[in-house]
Image (spheres, rainbow, N blue to C red):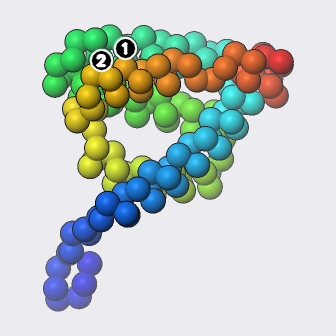
Amino acid sequence: MLPNRGARVARWSVEDLEEIYELRSMLESHAAQRAAERMSAAQVDALTELCEQMEECARRGSRRGLLELSELNGRFHGLILEAADSCRLSTMLASVVQVPLVVRTFTRYSPEALARSMNHHRDWPPPSDLGYRNGLGR
């Protein structure tokens, strides 16, 4: 906000968005690793349930279903971030996730991209990575 000039809307170039996605990918990978080492059995069950709900929304394919999918996806990633247990990581991710999620939503995904996204959610984390610290996995 500029004094006596009001608010300005940021303009994002393709390069800006590509960099944000790259940073997001690196931070989310780190969060996923931390979460896999710390996640409780109840959290694993909650992720599984969220995956099932997300897949149902994706199957419906309606705009309403995809908007619901977006909300469930936020909960899925929030649960991973909660299990990662890092305030700094949460803050850093919050600063790079908001912009691209507004620009690129599930409603813009092709059917193939949507199926790939659902597979990525379902495949995470590998069972051997779960609960390392809690003795649930390895």
Mark 1–mark 2 CB contact (< 8 Å)? yes
| Residue at screen point 58% across, 23% down | 124
Determine if residue 68 is in view. Answer: no
- Quarter of the image with the N terminus is bottom left
Q: Is residue 129 left or right of residue 54?
A: right
User: Which numbered circle lies on residue 58?
Assistant: 2
3D distance between C-alphas at marks 1 and 2: 5 Å
The three-letter amino acid code for the residue at tag 1 is Glu
The three-letter amino acid code for the residue at tag 2 is Ala
Instruction: Answer above or below: position of 33 versus 57.
Output: below
- Outermost residue on the bottom side: it is 4
- Quarter of the image with the C terminus is top right
| Residue at screen point 49% across, 34% down | 77
Q: What percent of the width, then of the height, locates residue 90? A: 55, 49
Q: What percent of the width, then of the height, locates residue 26? A: 58, 49
| Residue at screen point 66% across, 33% down | 35
Count neighbours of disc 1 (C-alpha within 10 A) and say few if under 14, some if 14 to 19, many if 20 or more. Answer: many
Q: Is residue 30 left or right of residue 71?
A: right
Observer-nearest of 110 and 131: 110
